[in-house]
Amino acid sequence: MTEKKIRAMVAKPGLDGHDRGAKVISRALRDSGMEVIYTGLRQTPEQIVSAAIQEDIDVLLLSILSGAHDHLFSAIMQGLKEKKMDKVLVIGGGVIPQEDIPNLKKAGVSEIFGPGTSTETIITYVKEHLPS
Amino acid sequence: MELVKEALNGSERAIAQLITMVENELPGWMEAMKQVYPHTGNAYLIGFTGPTGSGKSTLVDRVALALHNQNYSIGIIAIDPSSPFTGGALLGDRVRMREVTDKEGVFIRSLGTRGGLGGISQATSDVIKILDASGKDCILIETIGIGQDEVEVVQIVDTSIVVSVPGLGDDIQTLKAGIMEIGDIFVVNKSDREGADHVVTMISAMLDLNPLTTVWRQPIVKTIATENQGIDELIEQIMLHRKHLTENDLLNAKRKERIGREITKLLEQKISQYVHDRIKGMHPFEDLIEQINNRENDPYSSVDILLNLLEEK
């Protein structure tokens, strides 16, 4: 019997076209031994939720730079909840103002990491907060 | 098993969880597969293989979309390599599969090779069965980007498609053994690029040299996947190949061979696990390693010694 591998998904919701950060995170998660599904740019909340279900992920990392995080994150959280995927650990990253964070957390996002966060910090956080 | 029941009814969440269970060999996975098996055998299995960057993912996306538009339900298994060092993997095929990701009845699962050889993973054929049993009409399997001799995919699909692109080498490449032997259909993708016709000629010349053992002459289809060109023709060829297999009773023969290989493989796995478990605790194993390293013994004689010990037990 093998140990269950951690499956993470890195997704870019919305319209910004910059995914350097998402790629760096994907690579770091890969190097930590996880299987990382990268969905690419400009994903709708519906596409992200559907991919999360089919890929049976443990962690969802959302990167967003466009400023539309309030709307997009809550749509994704709502979708996950409806599909009984609320056990998935959801983490946000990108350019998100401090004052918006409490609202996102209330919607169910576990943590928000801003620019400059080291990849180790994120990996450690993921490993410590994985749903059992 | 409740999970199997839900997956058989088509619940995407259950299908996904069942795949996770089987892929990780979590407790009960074999029981689950026993329950899945009677419901398999209805889907048509199509494999896509070819070098890195030849456009397999985009091609799979467009073929899936066209099949979806013809009212087929689709399963897609997209495989990418796992790191031999960390076991991690970046599964990026979804990036190119944008047309079908949100279509009703299309289920995409990305898999890491997890040490599997030949461009597919150990669990691939079980994942195929789960999607098959859940009611998918067609299952498309995309291998990792391959080089010359990763031919295992041919053993688990009904129609194999080998994807080439212009600019990869001269005609000696088409004469080599390996992947050029496994195509039921050849695709020259990115065919708007210079040299596409030359690739077609090279493959065609290679096919002319094949012994006439079959009535199926492998077609060569030119595509530009990003622009949806050649997709309909490719699907037509897939259907023709399927017809050829069924009409000549080759599909059954193919599937029986597959079952034979599968039993052998499972048996080998269980036997080697059994032998491993018993040998592992044996005292002489460590001693033998020491002796061999000192050149007082050799690996070949040691195997006989260990097997004799097993028999005595």
Image (spheres, rainbow, N blue to C red):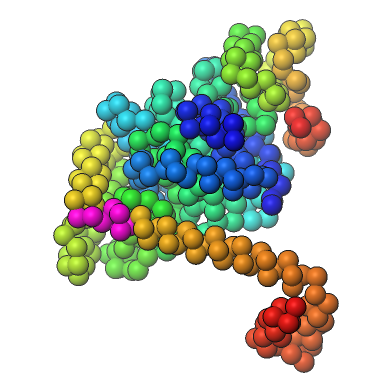
Query: Which residue is at a point 49% across and 60% down the rendered structure image?
Result: B263
Relative to B118, A74 lies left or right: right
Residue A36, quarter of picture: top right
Viewer-proximal residue, B214 or B37?
B37
Q: Residue at x 78, y 78 (%)?
A: B285
If the image is split into quadrants, where does the C terminus of chain A sit?
A: top right
Q: Is residue B236 left or right of residue B298?
A: left
Q: Position of residue A24 (x, y in %)?
A: 65, 36
Left or right of B313, for residue B262: left
Q: Quadrant of residue A30?
A: top right
Query: Who's the residue at 54% across and 53% down the image?
Result: B122
- Side (left or right) of B78 relative to B282: left
Quadrant assignment, res A57: top right
Q: Is residue B291 above or below residue A21?
A: below
Asked whether B81 falls inside the magenta stretch, the response is no
Q: Residue at x 54, y 45 (%)?
A: B33
In the image, the segment drawn in magenta is B248-254
Residue A8 in sight in this render: yes
Residue B162 shows up from this direction:
no
Main SS of residues in magenta? helix
A29 above or below B47?
above
Task: Using the image, determine if residue B69 lies above or below residue B303.
Answer: above
| A116 and A119: which is toward the camera | A119
Residue B46's x, y, as percent? 35, 45
* Residue B249 highlighted magenta (yes or no): yes
